[in-house]
Image: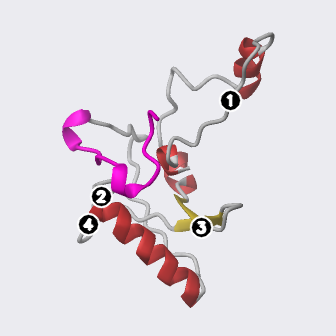
Amino acid sequence: DLFPHGYHEFKGVHYSLGEMRINLKYGALPVRKSPYRMNPNMRVRVKEELDKMIEFDIIKAMEESEWISPLVINIKKDGWIRICVDYRDLNVICIIDPFPTPFTKEILEGAAGCEVYSFMDGFSGYHQ
């Protein structure tokens, strides 16, 4: 019971937990992408989900921004939606992290020989 099971149990994310910086290549200009097309029913579901995320302080609404990346929606096996953002164009102008996340193969090799394995959703950790 370490992770919340729904938005009603979530405590929110406060900006005081830390600061994040995205280092961009010299001369990079803001990425402004148009939204991807979405059917009206999905648009309603996405709005409901975004409204919940705003209500529970998971995300914040912005009036306007120079940086715009489109949403990508994935339908989970249980029928719920997973809201993702397509940051591919932003990634192109980012400076590569000198301490990257380990490769999946390295992680799996490190887990070899263990007796217990588990899978956690962690209430859609990092918005999965």
Q: Earlier in the sequence, mark 3 or mark 4?
A: 4
Mark 2 and mark 4: Cα distance apart in space: 16 Å
Whether tag 3 and tag 1 are in contact, CB under 8 A, the answer is: no
Q: Which residue is mark 2?
A: 56
Where, by quadrant of the figure, is residue 4 drawn? top left
Q: Is residue 94 left or right of residue 102?
A: left
Relative to the observer, which residue lies in front, 75 or 123? 123
Question: Residue sitting at 71 percent across and 61 percent down?
Answer: 77
Element under disc 3: strand
- Looking at the rendering, the stretch of residues picked out in magenta corresponds to 1-18
Residue 56 spot, x, y in % from top left: 30, 58
Residue 16 spot, x, y in % from top left: 19, 37
Q: Earlier in the sequence, mark 3 or mark 1?
A: 3
Of tags 2 and 4, the one toward the viewer is: 2
Element under disc 1: loop
Q: Which residue is mark 4?
A: 62
* As drawn, 15 above or below 41: above
Whether the magenta-drawn stretch holds residue 17 is answered as yes
Q: Which residue is mark 1?
A: 118
Whether tag 1 and tag 4 are in contact, CB under 8 A, the answer is: no
Mark 3 and mark 2: Cα distance apart in space: 20 Å
Of tags 3 and 1, the one toward the viewer is: 1
Q: Amino acid at mark 4?
A: Met
Q: Amino acid at mark 3?
A: Ile
Mark 3 and mark 1: Cα distance apart in space: 26 Å
Q: Which residue is mark 3?
A: 73
